Image (cartoon, rainbow, N blue to C red):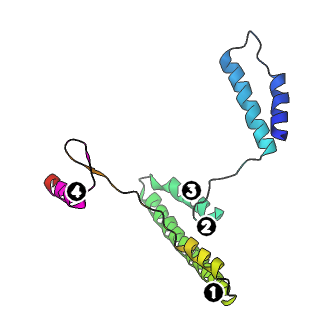
């Protein structure tokens, strides 16, 4: 409610004037929405980390490595390799530490006889993204669902 009320009051102040161009009014509207959203909701800083063992310092190292990647000088290549090797070691160590910590948590849940939480933790640790299946179509564009027919199609193509 606070966000909506604040936006309404600010938009009333920047209501369109007959001489305004639509683009000018749109820019003012967009600025009001952004500003109020940042004040009310907040602003996230930095990229979203998808893997839990990646830290902000690792992201900084990745940015440094990226700066050296496309340079052709020998010094740049050496610097890139050096940063890449260091980053690989750091991330591998962090991943192993995280997995060891998760395993300890699972063992502790097992000792406490909290089977439901233990199985949930194991599933979270082992969960893999499902892959979508690849569909094969015949010459007419018809979807082939029989596995034997698909193999024949692949053999015919190659």
Query: Looking at the image, which is closer to me, 145 or 81?
Result: 145
Of tags 4 and 2, the one toward the viewer is 4
Compared to residue 40, the image places residue 112 above or below, namely below
The residues tagged by marks 2 and 3 sit, at their Cα atoms, a distance apart of 18 Å
Neighbor class of circle 2 (other Cα within 10 Å; few <14, some 14-19, many 20+) is: few
- Residue 49 picture location, percent across and down: 61, 59
Contact, mark 2 vs mark 1 (Cβ under 8 Å): no
Q: Tell me which numbered mark, 4 or 2, is placed earlier along the sequence.
A: 2
Query: Looking at the image, which is closer to me, 75 or 23?
Result: 23
- Residue 129 picture location, percent across and down: 48, 63
* Magenta range: 140-155
Asked if residue 2 is among those painted magenta in the image, a careful observer would answer no
Report helix, strand or loop for mark 2. Answer: loop
Of tags 1 and 4, the one toward the viewer is 4
Q: Which residue is mark 1?
A: 107
Q: Which residue is mark 3?
A: 63
Q: Decide if residue 43 is on the left or right side of residue 76.
A: right
Q: Decide if residue 54 is on the left or right side of residue 16.
A: left
């Amino acid at each position: 409610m606070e966000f909506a009320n604040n936006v309404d009051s600010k938009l009333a102040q920047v209501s369109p004037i007959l001489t305004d161009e639509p683009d000018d009014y749109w820019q003012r509207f967009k600025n009001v929405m952004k500003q109020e959203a940042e004040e009310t909701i907040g602003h996230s800083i930095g990229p979203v980390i998808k893997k839990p063992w990646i830290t902000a310092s690792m992201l900084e190292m990745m940015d440094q490595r990226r700066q050296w990647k496309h340079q052709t000088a020998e010094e740049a290549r050496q610097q890139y390799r050096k940063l890449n090797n260091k980053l690989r070691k750091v991330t591998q160590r962090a991943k192993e530490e995280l997995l060891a910590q998760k395993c300890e948590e699972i063992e502790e849940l097992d000792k406490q006889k909290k089977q439901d939480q233990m199985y949930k933790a194991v599933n979270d640790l082992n969960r893999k993204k499902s892959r979508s299946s690849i569909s094969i179509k015949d010459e007419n564009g018809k979807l082939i669902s029989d596995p034997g027919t698909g193999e024949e199609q692949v053999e015919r193509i190659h």
